């Protein structure tokens, strides 16, 4: 089973050629520039990001396999997910929230808060 972290939510369509308007759920809206693929929550499909642009704190994406406005409408209000890959992933921090942090001798230093 794949583990995902939500990076955005499709809020509406943009135009008639299949662009989606997304609300970013990450701390850095321009993170989408670094991504090649995302997963659409509705059908759990891996989709290549063909184009990204930003306007008014929203992310506009052209995704592979979403080629018309009807396909956008079917995916509206669903999340965009990023697969979490093993230990050492940048997104492992989400798993650390709420855990105690210890130094090498085992002394508790505190707790990770989100």
Image (cartoon, grey):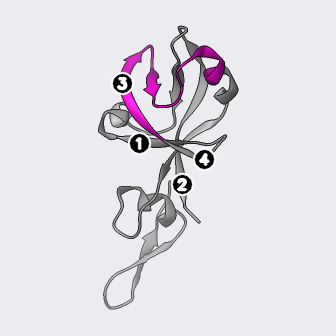
Pick whichever of labels 1 and 2 is earlier in the sequence: 2
Give the alpha-carbon distance from disc 3 to disc 2, as whole Å: 22 Å
Q: Residue at x 65, y 29 (%)?
A: 75
| Label of residue 4 in the image | 2
Q: Position of residue 24 (x, y in %)?
A: 49, 32
Nearest the viewer among 5 and 46 is 46
Q: Position of residue 36 (x, y in %)?
A: 35, 40
The span shown in magenta is 47-72
Asked if the residue at tag 4 contacts the one at tag 1, i.e. Cβ–Cβ closer than 8 Å, the answer is: no
Secondary structure beneath label 3? strand
**Where is 104 relative to 68, above or below?**
below
Q: Earlier in the sequence, mark 1 or mark 3?
A: 1
Dividing the picture into quadrants, the one containing residue 68 is: top right
Q: Residues within 10 Å of mark 4 (few under 14, many from 20)?
A: few
Q: Which mark is first along the chain, 4 or 3?
A: 4
Q: Is residue 70 magenta?
A: yes
**3D distance between C-alphas at marks 3 and 4:** 20 Å
> For numbered disc 1, what is the local secondary structure?
strand
| Residue at (47% x, 54% y) in the render | 83
User: Could you tell which of marks 4 and 2 lies nearer the N-terminus?
Assistant: 2
Q: Which residue is mark 4?
A: 44
- Verify CB contact (< 8 Å) between mark 3 and mark 2: no
Give the mark toward the camera: 1 or 2: 1
- The residue carrying mark 3 is 51
Q: Secondary structure at mark 2?
A: strand
Q: Which mark is residue 37?
A: 1
């Amino acid at each position: 089973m794949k583990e995902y972290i939500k990076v955005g939510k499709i809020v509406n369509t943009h135009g008639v050629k299949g662009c989606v308007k997304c609300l970013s759920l990450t701390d850095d809206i321009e993170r989408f520039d670094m991504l090649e693929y995302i997963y659409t929550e509705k059908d759990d499909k891996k989709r290549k990001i063909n184009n990204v642009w930003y306007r008014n704190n929203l992310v506009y994406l052209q995704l592979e396999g979403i080629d018309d406005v009807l396909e956008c409408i079917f995916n509206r209000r669903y999340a965009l997910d990023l697969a979490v890959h093993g230990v050492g992933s940048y997104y492992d921090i989400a798993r650390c929230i709420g855990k105690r942090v210890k130094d090498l001798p085992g002394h508790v230093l505190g707790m990770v808060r989100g």
